[in-house]
Amino acid sequence: MNRLLPALLLPLGLAVGQQQLLLRQPPRLLAVTPSAASSGPAGLELRFSRPMNRASVAAASRIDPPLPVRWLGAGSGLKLSLNPGVRLRGPLQLELAGLDNRGQQLATRRWVWDPRPRILAVVPVPGGEQLQLQQHNGRWQPLSPVWPRIFSVEVLGDGSGVAVVSQGQRTQGPAGQQIWLIPVQQRNLARAQLGLGPPQPGQPRALDQDRHLFAHLSSNRFGDLLIQSGGLEPGSARTLLWPRRAGRPITLPFEASGPMRLLPQGGAVVVPVSEGLTLQDLPPRAPRQQMLPGSRDLSSFCPRAGLALLVRHWPDFRRSLELVEPGRAPRQLWIGQQAVLASSCQGNGERFWIAQIEGIQRPVLTVLAMNREGKILARRSLPDWELEPGTPLSFDASNNHLLLVLRPWRQRSQGSVAPAAQAMVMDATSLALRPLGKQARLALWLPP
């Protein structure tokens, strides 16, 4: 027994000694990752080896150029968020320092961070169309091969790639549509000594060998990809979910009356049905369905989880824009006779933008900026332009810009060629329009 007791106590003593040694070690920064959603232009999630004194970290850390920021969170997980309204003109230098809750000093770490998204565009080129990316210096680089036609593009929500539906090469029979995934390696956050780098596209990978009659795509902030597709044969329609970290897709049993949309925060999908809109939970969650009846279309999501904009169609042919918040009935922001083409939303739903048209013989495009009470803050009529069909109105909080694709309006006679569409940015406050000098059929933001 006398020999056994020291043998039993020795591991306990070693564990206590090791614990005391670790407690005397200074805290370490374990991980820095961009925040998936922020009420401001951008945010960072920081994970430390032990609970930190948030006030000390906020006081000791520096950002260059100096910008108003907020420090949120507690314990070993903190969040740095740029304040709403900040406009970014270039990369940020970040110096992290401070004390933990035991008064131990964090070794200073320096990072360089560029939270500005880049622009992706479907560009007409000799032989067909090509997906191109605009660098922050204004230069454009090819991101894809030249395909005869690009039908749709879906940017993976984590910025790790782009899914494309293109026209297949005709060999035997109809060419059909083919689905590709183009990986994109980005370096928008790095140690100061390493520096940043331009995006590096990989080789396109066909997600299947089938040729489809139609294909609809959707992604969430985690980079998961939803594919709805169907062919000419009866029963060929199917819905697949490609999880970001999985090598194989999951077949979903949902039936829809239109394109489905993944919830940005993950875990569920919005499924349109003849009776309205349903929210269906995704595996591995247990099956669960929520229903919102009425003739409604999902228009866009807000960055804050659970907020979305819906377009409601009324029996008297009016349309309304509704804000949906968790646990509340849809709230009407706007109603009118105009057709709503696209919408966008800022942060927690402080501001909204609508692209609408009115008129039959000579439709007039108008962009409205509104607050969450439905008050119109700005209005811009664009009688000389029309929104390229099927293109979105996308908001970038880092520069307070809206991205859209416009085509010059011109009375067309039968057989005449339509004028080329152009990618443009619009100031989200003044609604001033600035062409990018690039012909495009579609333009989207590539998140950092």
Image: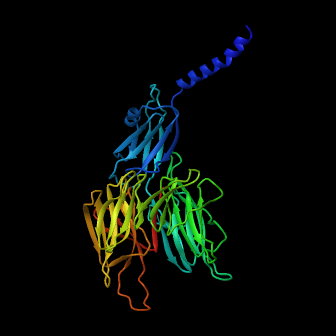
**Vertical placement of residue 44 versus 378, above or below:** above
Q: Is 22 placed left or right of 118 in the picture?
A: right
**Vertical placement of residue 4 versus 154, above or below:** above
**Vertical placement of residue 365 versus 135, above or below:** below
Residue depicted at 49% across the width and 69% down the height: 258
Q: Is 373 placed left or right of 157 in the picture?
A: left
Residue depicted at 47% across the width and 50% down the height: 36
What residue occupies the far top of the structure in this picture?
2
Percent x, y for residue 176? 61, 77
Percent x, y for residue 332? 31, 61
- Colour setup of the view: rainbow
Q: Is 288 placed left or right of 351 in the picture?
A: right
Q: Is residue 50 visible?
A: yes
* In the foreground, 306 or 192: 306
Percent x, y for residue 57? 41, 35
Residue depicted at 58% across the width and 23% down the height: 19
Q: Is residue 431 visible?
A: no
Percent x, y for residue 351? 32, 58
Residue depicted at 59% across the width and 56% down the height: 243
